[in-house]
Amino acid sequence: MKIMKKHGFTLIELLVTISIISVLTAIGLANYSVSQKRARDARRQADLESVRSALEIYRADNLSTGYPTTSTYSNLSATLIPNYLSQLPLDPKNVSPYTYTYTGGGNTYTICANQLERTAVSYCLTPP
């Protein structure tokens, strides 16, 4: 009587392996998505801090007029570029509701990231 050697894997072994790989992949993709959202939110906050710094330097240089008076965030580029910023930062997604807004003039301003992805709230800065 000849004993047959086992070659390859059984169907059950393959199904268990594929299931384990699928679960690990799903967990990895979920964590990657959360990390991407956190990174975009951190960039939003850093962008607004850099614009805030530029606005403070602008005001120090223009004490008589104060902060720029503009109707939109994009209009800040005419005032801040190239002396205070090399370019005006844009939201990483830059589609509604993920946009930056600016209101101000004189002695005050408010600059906001309309929505953070992780918390779904606005992040706003005002003069110190």
Image (cartoon, rainbow, N blue to C red):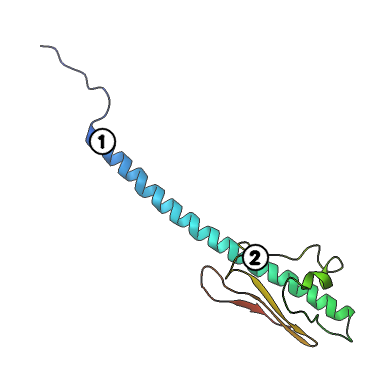
Q: Residue at x 28, y 35 (%)?
A: 14
Q: Is residue 30 visible?
A: yes
- Residue furthest out toward the top: 1
How far from the left and from the top, in percent, is residue 31? Answer: 46, 56
Rate crowding at label 2 as few (under 14), some (14 to 19) or many (20 or more) other CA atoms within 10 Å: some
The residue tagged 1 is: 13
**Which quadrant does the C terminus fall into?**
bottom right
Sequence-wise first label, 1 or 2: 1
Of circles 1 and 2, which is in front? 2
How far from the left and from the top, in percent, is residue 40? Answer: 59, 62
The residue tagged 2 is: 91
- Residue furthest out toward the left: 1
At mark 2, the secondary structure is loop
Q: Nearer the viewer, residue 56 or 2?
A: 56
* Residue 25 as seen in the image, left or right of residue 116: left
> Looking at the picture, which amino acid does disc 1 mark?
Glu
Query: In the image, which disc is placed on residue 128?
Result: none
Q: Residue at x 64, y 78 (%)?
A: 124
Q: Is residue 84 above or below residue 10?
A: below
At mark 1, the secondary structure is helix
Q: Is residue 128 visible?
A: no
Q: Nearer the viewer, residue 64 or 9?
A: 64
Q: Residue at x 81, y 82 (%)?
A: 67
**Total labels drawn:** 2
How far from the left and from the top, in percent, is residue 17? Answer: 31, 39
Q: Nearer the viewer, residue 88 or 74?
A: 74
> Looking at the picture, which amino acid does disc 2 mark?
Asp
Q: Is residue 59 above or below residue 3?
A: below
Q: Residue at x 51, y 72 (%)?
A: 119
